[in-house]
Structures are given as structure tokens and as C-alpha cells.
Image (cartoon, rainbow, N blue to C red):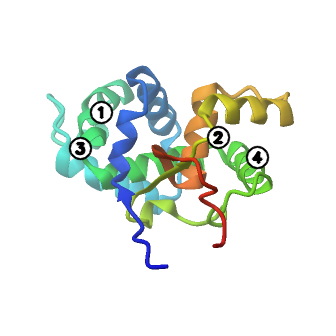
Amino acid sequence: MNEKIEFLPFNAINEFMLSEYRKVVFKSVFSNFASLQNSRQKSINSLIKKNVKIQGFRDSTQAPVVYKINNSISLFEKSASFSAEILSAWYELNPDLAQKVNQMLTDKGWIILPIETDRSKLPGFLIKWPAEDSFEKLTEEFRNIYPEITYSDDDISLMIVWMSNRLPYEMDAENIFSKE
């Protein structure tokens, strides 16, 4: 068995995210920036300084949150490394959701990396997705297991993508997690 593993760059997530939800993720990250690990803050700020120009600010990292959100979207759309850092920051701010999604996927037999793995260091998202597991089905299963959870369906879906390190690019009818 000599199968090649294919990846999509992290910014490919834009094909699966609604633009309004993308802004929700950015607002969460930039509004809670001080809560992030210092290394994550430095990495995001470095990418913003180099790539985001905000009129009236020599240092774009000093701009108000709303300006950073609006002016960073295009960088998120074209830069895999910036996308990975923003998604990692969002994951870092939602540890309870990450733990619950990790447990659900593991219980379903999905083979995923340990929860503490820094997924931003990976080459991108795997492209194969189990055909029987749509976002709607997975979200419904999650809500059945955790009825007290108040996260949005978009939050649950994004965490499923991040924890599994997969995008539903290529639906696979076979069990992609079999050991064969």
C-alpha cells in the first residue's frame, strides 16, 4: 500500500466558511487576544505587521479590533500560515468545545491527533472525509451527546474540521479510518 496523502492549505477553509462567520471567528480571536499564548500573539502580530496595512496606523497591530478584522480577512483568504494561526487561536479560546468534539470524534472511530497537538504546524488539511458524516449529522450527534452546549452549529463544525484536520473536499464512501 503506497498511497499518497494529499493536503489542502489551511486557507482552503475559506471555501467552506460563510463570510459572516469568518468575522465572528476574527472578533473572538482579536477581542480575547490577551488570553492567547504569548507565542501565538507574537506570530499573529508578526503576520499582521508584515501583511496588513490599515490607514492611519503605522503599526497595524495597534488598530482597533474592528479595523483589524476588516483588514485581515484578505490575508486569511490567501495565507495558509495566517489562517492556521487564527484557527489555532480560536481553538485555544474554546478548550471545552475542543475536548467535547475530540471525545465525540474518537468515540465514532475517527483517527485524530492528540488534542494538545499544534495543528498549525501541519502542512494543511487532509482532503478525505467520511461520506456518511455530513456536518449536519455530526452537529446533530454532538447536540444529542451534549444537549447543554450553547455553541453555534458553525462553531461545532469548525471545531470538527480543526480537531480532525480534515475538510470535506473528497467524500469517501469507504471507511477512511480502517487499518487495511
Contact, CB < 8 Å: mark 4 with mark 1?
no
Write down the quadrant of residue 107 in the picture. Answer: bottom right
| Residue labelled with disc 2 | 132
Q: Residues within 10 Å of mark 3 (few under 14, many from 20)?
A: some
**Residue type beneath disc 3:** Lys
Element type at mark 3: helix
Among all residues in the image, which is located at the extreme top?
A: 20
Q: Position of residue 149 (x, y in %)?
A: 78, 30
Q: Which mark is residue 73?
A: 1
Q: Residues within 10 Å of mark 1 (few under 14, many from 20)?
A: some
Asked if 41 appears above or below 74 in the picture, the reply is below
Instruction: Name the image quarter holding the C terminus.
Output: bottom right
| Residue labelled with disc 3 | 78
Decide if residue 79 is on the left or right side of residue 132: left
**Residue type beneath disc 4:** Lys
**Residue type beneath disc 1:** Ile
